[in-house]
Structure formats: C-alpha cells, structure tokens
Amino acid sequence: MQSSCSNLDFDAIKNSFLFYKTVTSQYKDPQVLRSVRDLIPVDVLEGEYLVPSLLKWFVGFMTWTPNQIFCNNCNADDDSKNLMQVKVQAGNSWRIRKTEIHTCSKCGAEKIIPRYSDALKIAETRCGRCGEWSILFAAILNSVNVKSRIAYDYLDHCWNEVLVDGKWLHTDSTFQYPHSFDNPHYYERNWKKQYVYIIGFSQNDIEDVTERYTEQLDTVLSRRQGLGNYGNLNLGSISDLQDLYKHVPSLYNV
C-alpha cells in the first residue's frame, strides 16, 4: 500500500489528466450508457435507495484481481504457494493501458492480465482492481442518471463520487456496503495515507476534493508546497491544474 506521493511531478500529473480525460469521455457516449444499464438487474433498479442498491449488487458482479498471483499449476501439486513474477508492458491504446505478464519461475506457466480502461470491455471481463471497478461503476451510475466522477489520490487508489442532493459523496465500489458509501476518512485512518492531492475527474473539469478525505489538511497543504513549478505552471495551485486540464485532449474514439 503506497502511503506517500514521493514521485508526484508534472509528467505524472499530465499523464493522469490525459488518462482520466479520455476515460470520462465514455460517460457521454449513449451506446456505452445503454450497454452498461442493461447489466443492472430490475430489482436493483427498483430498490428504495438506488446508490446503496447498486453498490451491494456491483461488489458481487465484479471479481477482484489480486496484486500477487500464485501459480495454479504448482500449487495444485502441493501446499506451497509459488508467487509468480510479473513484467509489465505498456499498452498500445487508451483501451488497454498496460498488460501484466505473470510467470512462474518453477514451471514456466504464464498468466496474462490486460488492464482495461474501456468500460464495455471491463463489463465483459467483470474483473480488475480499483481502476477497472471505478471506471465501470461510474459508467453504471451515469447510465441511471446518477451523476458520478472518479477520484484519484495520486498514491495507489481511485474510487467514485456521486452527486446526491447537490453534494458529492464518497463511493468506493470495491468495499462492502455500508463501508463503501460516504466513508471518506477510511483511507487516511486505516491505510495511513499521506495525501498531496485527491482530484475528482469529470470529462470537462477537475476539482480538488482533498479536504473531504483528510483530517490533516494543514499537513497536506504543506506537502503540496513542495511540488514546485514546471515552467509557469505552479503544481501546487489547483487553478493552474484546472487550466492545464482544459487543454488536455481526450483520446476517446481515436
């Protein structure tokens, strides 16, 4: 679990902007929204409280991909756990941002795990980590007219936020309900997160949402001051970053 943003710089920020600008463009595509809405069971849609109902359903719909993969061939022979070694290849489009190749040093078996960013492909495979879960869940929420965006902590985790009665609420589909809903301080309290930024990403804008997730705002702002400048861009200024985001292109449908 990564707890501090020691490698946060201009390139990391700009790459995240390009990624999320493209990913969130899917939520304006009627075909994507129709397709993911069709996945939702009728009884879930008819639940008294829609977002909690969707969270309870979705955590069973998806399968978590562990970070550490053990060899099924070797483990089938004895009780030992043989950890596979992983090599990561960069993806050739935004739809597959990277591919993990897990290899067993004992028997040579391979397990290939594509890391998809395409909501429809994630819906087809129904597996992934927080990136895949948050991408698809945002599409599902938007498909039922619940405005949603992705929040990223620039450490190792992302989740969703939903707009309820004019207020953005924390929503993490990788957790079991009720911990998955409106539980913003969980990461800092339990995972000892040391934030610099948490940014909420929509297609056309970003928002600094860090204050909602920290009980140590002064410390966070102090860390942020250490980001410095990149040319005329102040990396510690959310208004500068918002201006940068406006000029970042979306690669959707390219």
Image (cartoon, rainbow, N blue to C red):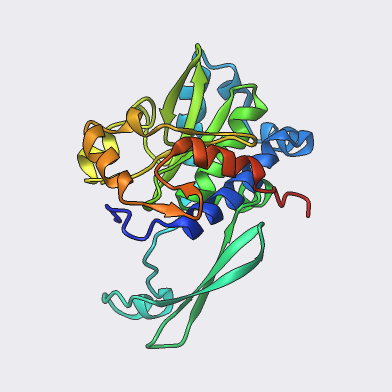
Q: Is 148 placed above or below 8 here? A: above
User: Residue 79: x, y in percent?
Assistant: 26, 75
User: Residue 61: x, y in percent?
Assistant: 53, 41
Q: Is 242 placed above or below 124 here? A: above
Q: Residue furthest front?
A: 232
> Looking at the image, which residue is at 68% across and 31% down?
37
Res. 247 image quadrant: top right
Report the number of numbered marks. Answer: 0
* Residue nearest the observer in this picture, 168 or 171: 168
Q: Split into 4 quadrants, where in the image is the N terminus?
A: bottom left
Q: Split into 4 quadrants, where in the image is the C terminus?
A: bottom right
> Looking at the image, which residue is at 62% across and 67% down?
91
* Residue nearest the observer in this picture, 78 or 104: 104
Q: Is residue 175 left or right of residue 122?
A: left
> Looking at the image, which residue is at 31% across and 58% down?
6
User: Residue 47: x, y in percent?
Assistant: 53, 17
Q: Is 108 placed above or below 46 here? A: below
User: Does residue 235 appear in the picture of this structure?
Assistant: yes
Res. 94 image quadrant: bottom right
User: Does residue 179 appear in the picture of this structure?
Assistant: no
User: Residue 198: x, y in percent?
Assistant: 40, 40
> Looking at the image, which residue is at 43% across and 47% down?
235
